[in-house]
Image (spheres, rainbow, N blue to C red):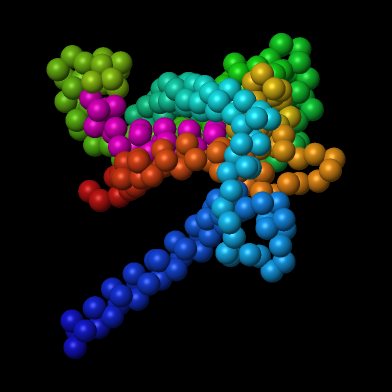
Amino acid sequence: MAVQRSRTQAVSVTILGWAVGLVLFFPIGWMVLTSFKTEIDAFATPPSLFFTPTLENYAAVNSRIDYVSYALNSVYISFGSTFLCLILGGMAAYSMAFFPTKRTDGTLLWMLSTKMMPAVGVLVPMYMGFRDLGLLNSVVGMILLMTLVNLPIVVWMLYTYFRDYPKEILEAARVDGAGSWQEMVHILLPTTLPGIVSTSLLTIILSWNEAFWSINLTGPDSGPLTAFIASFSSPEGLFWAKLSAASTLAIAPILVLGWLSQRQLVRGLTFGAVK
């Protein structure tokens, strides 16, 4: 009886998991499907499930805008800001986790509170500051901005991993004469690598998907793929088939990255959960 009940529960959980997965994947699947339709089929009511696939939307996207330049800008911004976040956030998290003060908790809460403020509330001062510093329509400016935007999340995640790290190991290293830099580089970083990798992947995804700042602070020379998608909005309206093709091209690289690194991401997010 217990075996039968356990088997029933396993089947129920599997069905529920597949159902949730299909619901979450449906918008992406429908977007990809629409990208192979003509504009007439894309606007059909009710939606047409059977149609003749076409690549004319992808041809139109590639002929209108240089997809590669936008993709390269996304790579530069995402990976550049992630690198800076790991350097700055790693040092901050190390200091807070192993050398806490009475202000550490307050500082962490203050950093997290900055993520609760709507971005539009600081758009004007940010725009004016970027203009005066010559960072408008600049990849460097977007790298710095994405670093500032994602730094609180990076500090919090790395702080959580470092805080749960056995301090006895570092104390033993200090007894052997290791300094703070040697502790961090040769002991802490290699042993907390899953957490660092998951933090890196999450930061890359957040930077890649950022649309608000890229649309308002970049131009044709520095725009990432989110600006590439927005460029398909015109006074004549939205061309859903071409917009779906542009969106598919924009999310394809990050979807492939997430699929290839899903094991590392899950391992990192659960790092330290089981002692």
**Is 92 on the left or on the right of 137, as rendered?**
left
Instruction: Choose between 265 and 76: the one closer to the eye.
Output: 76
Percent x, y of residue 128: 78, 20
Instruction: Choose between 249 and 7: the one closer to the eye.
Output: 249
Residue located 73% across and 29% down the image: 216
Residue 75 is a magenta residue: no
Q: In this view, does 143 lie above or below 106?
A: above
Residue 195 is a magenta residue: yes
Which residues are the magenta region? 187-208
Q: Name the outermost residue toward the right.
A: 235
**Is 131 on the left or on the right of 87, as rendered?**
right
Magenta stretch: dominant secondary structure: helix
Percent x, y of residue 245: 60, 43
Residue located 59% across and 16% down the image: 140
Q: In which quarter of the image is the N terminus?
A: bottom left
Residue located 28% across and 80% down the image: 8
Instruction: Choose between 150 and 207: the one closer to the eye.
Output: 207
Q: Name the outermost residue toward the bottom.
A: 1
Percent x, y of residue 156: 46, 37
**Is 48 on the left or on the right of 267, as rendered?**
right
